[in-house]
Image: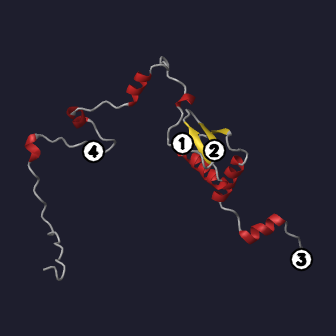
Amino acid sequence: MPSIRKLSPDEVHERKHGKPSQRSVVSREYDTMLGQFDIGDWGEVVVDPSEKRLTIRNRLQSAAERKSVKIRFFRTQGPVIRFEVQSPSSDDEDTAGDDDEEYLPQPEGDSAGDDDEAEAVFLPAPASQSEDATQKRGPGRPRKVRSDADSEPTPKKPGRPRRVPAEPVGAE
């Protein structure tokens, strides 16, 4: 005789709709985590060493968009991401990549009253021509140094001639 059993509602749902994808499971988890926060609340995320900060930040921003709020992130050091939940109509000038530096620890020997020195630190020094010639531009190829003797134009490579556009009909 065959055995008969009734399927649970979860099993029926799984049979009708299939298993949820890993992406949808993760997005639901972030939605429930962010669901605890109201506008004006602050939060911290401790990043697991196996995860990337950027991935967590992007997932939080996506969850915030689904909840119709904004998230403002603050600069932190170490495996912590600190954020504030804001209303979607908050000013863009407040979040234009201008993170509050007051939340960062000040370096040793740095006085907070020296505004002139702090500005000088952030402004790059003008590079001279000789420094620019020896300095690499990132991980790629160094900049080519040109002298007065090299100012002659380089000869054109032989190849297919350029196509000249045809004159329009009746342009006489």
Sequence-first disc among 4 and 2: 2
Residue under circle 1? 95
Residue under circle 2? 86
Q: Is residue 53 visible?
A: yes
What numbered label is drawn on residue 141?
Answer: 4
Residue under circle 3? 2
How many residues crowd mark 3 within 10 Å: few (<14), some (14–19), many (20+)? few
| Relative to 141, 65 lies left or right | right
Q: Position of residue 31 (x, y in %)?
A: 69, 52
For the C terminus, the quadrant is: bottom left
Sequence-first disc among 1 and 4: 1
What residue lies at 56% left-to-right and 34% top-to-bottom?
76
- Residues 13 and 163: in front is 163
Look at the picture and state if 39 lies above or below 16.
above
What SS does tag 1 mark? helix
- Hey, what amino acid is under mark 4? Arg
In the figure, residue 50 lies in which quadrant? top right
- Hey, what amino acid is under mark 3? Pro
Mark pair 3, 4: CA separation: 75 Å
How many residues crowd mark 4 within 10 Å: few (<14), some (14–19), many (20+)? few
- Hey, what amino acid is under mark 2? Gln
| Relative to 140, 70 lies left or right | right
